[in-house]
């Protein structure tokens, strides 16, 4: 109860001072290339700012800061998501199945690897030595 009132007071003071937080999504985009460099694929991370632990990870053919639910492969998780590229296959390691899309057309192919919670925790400790990258 007291925390709620204090939060409202702080938010009101911040707004009066012109110190409102930027609530726009934060994007991080990683570009990956096919083995022969003829195709690109983008892993896009949309973070929803302060206080939102859930991140949206999009595997897409374009680098635009947007989500195309018809063409993109979309993962949403509160847990870390990892990937590894092996020639023209990108393996995505996560605790949830993609909510949209399931495959990419072209040379670069996507493989979803669904991990249990214990496997995910082990991955957090061993991903670097396995040549796997955490998606940030």
Image: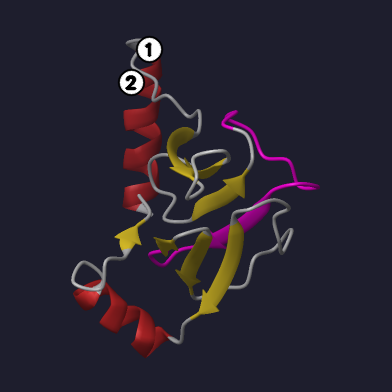
In the rendered image, residue 3, in percent from the top left (x then y), is placed at: 32, 50
Q: Which residue does the image show at 35% across and 49% down from the upper left?
A: 136
Q: Residue furthest right?
A: 70
Q: Residue furthest front?
A: 36
- Image quadrant where residue 63 sits: top right
Q: Which residue does the image show at 59% across and 63% down from the upper left?
A: 110
Q: Which residue does the image show at 41% across and 85% down from the upper left?
A: 117
* Residue nearest the observer in this picture, 46 or 68: 68
- Image quadrant where residue 119 sits: bottom left
| Residue under pointer 1 | 16
Q: Is residue 97 left or right of residue 37?
A: right
Q: Which mark is residue 35?
A: none
Crowd rating for badge 1 (residues with CA inside 10 Å; few <14, some 14–19, many 20+): few
Q: Which residues are magenta?
A: 63-81
Residue 46 in the magenta stretch? The answer is no
In the rendered image, residue 4, in percent from the top left (x then y), is placed at: 39, 47
Indicate the quadrant containing the N terminus: top left, top right, bottom left or bottom right: bottom left
Q: Secondary structure at mark 1?
A: helix
State whether residue 69 is above or below residue 118: above
Crowd rating for badge 2 (residues with CA inside 10 Å; few <14, some 14–19, many 20+): few
| Residue under pointer 2 | 13
* Residue nearest the observer in this picture, 38 or 13: 38
State whether residue 7 is above or below residue 17: below
Query: Disc 1 vs disc 2: Cβ atoms closer than 8 Å?
Result: yes
């Amino acid at each position: 109860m007291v925390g709620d009132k204090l939060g409202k007071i702080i938010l009101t003071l911040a707004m009066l001072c012109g110190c409102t937080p930027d609530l726009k999504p934060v994007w991080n985009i990683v570009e990956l290339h096919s083995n022969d460099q003829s195709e690109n694929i983008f892993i896009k991370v949309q973070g929803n700012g302060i206080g939102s632990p859930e991140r949206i990870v999009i595997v897409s053919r374009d680098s635009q800061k947007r989500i195309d639910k018809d063409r993109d492969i979309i993962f949403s998780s509160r847990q870390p998501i990892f990937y590894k590229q092996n020639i023209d296959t990108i393996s995505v390691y996560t605790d949830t199945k993609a909510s949209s899309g399931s495959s990419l057309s072209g040379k670069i192919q996507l493989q979803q690897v669904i991990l249990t919670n214990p496997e995910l925790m082990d991955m957090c400790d061993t991903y670097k030595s396995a040549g796997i990258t955490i998606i940030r």
